[in-house]
């Protein structure tokens, strides 16, 4: 993107926690590595924004999630309230893999 002289990047998400992570990183210690990666990304561009949008406006993410469920991809999810750290598991299944 920098090679193409793109200096402004805008991300939109329907996940309010993701926005909160970037605004209040000290409250999300489990995601320190990911937050640091995002902060390095911000340094590479003149303007980087991450904003919350309603789920109803996030049709692309909804489509990707439905396709992944149909193909039975395994997603990694970290649940900070679980002792095991939310080990990766198949969507729609309670068993860990």
Image (tube, rainbow, N blue to C red):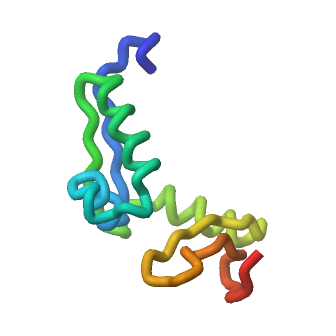
Residue 81 or residue 56, whichever sits in front: 81
- Percent of width and height locating residue 60: 50, 56
Residue at (34% x, 51% y) in the render: 12
Residue 2 or residue 67, whichever sits in front: 2
- Percent of width and height locating residue 34: 45, 49
Left or right of residue 50, residue 58 in this image: right
Residue 74 visible from this viewpoint: yes
Quarter of the rendering occupied by the N terminus? top left
Quarter of the rendering occupied by the C terminus? bottom right
Residue at (68% x, 88% y) in the render: 94
Q: Quadrant of residue 75?
A: bottom right
How many marks the image carries: the answer is 0
Residue 52 visible from this viewpoint: no
Residue at (36% x, 65% y) in the render: 15
Residue at (55% x, 74% y) in the render: 85
Q: Quadrant of residue 55?
A: bottom left
Q: Is residue 82 above or below residue 71?
A: below
- Percent of width and height locating residue 8: 29, 27
């Amino acid at each position: 993107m920098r090679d193409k002289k793109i200096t402004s990047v805008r991300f939109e998400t329907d996940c309010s926690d993701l926005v909160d992570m970037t605004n209040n990183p000290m409250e999300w210690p489990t995601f320190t590595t990911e937050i640091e990666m995002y902060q390095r990304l911000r340094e590479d561009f003149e303007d980087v924004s991450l904003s919350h949008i309603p789920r109803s406006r996030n049709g692309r993410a909804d489509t990707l999630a439905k396709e992944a469920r149909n193909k039975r991809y395994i997603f990694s999810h970290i649940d900070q309230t679980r002792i095991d750290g939310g080990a990766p598991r198949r969507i729609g299944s309670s068993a860990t893999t």
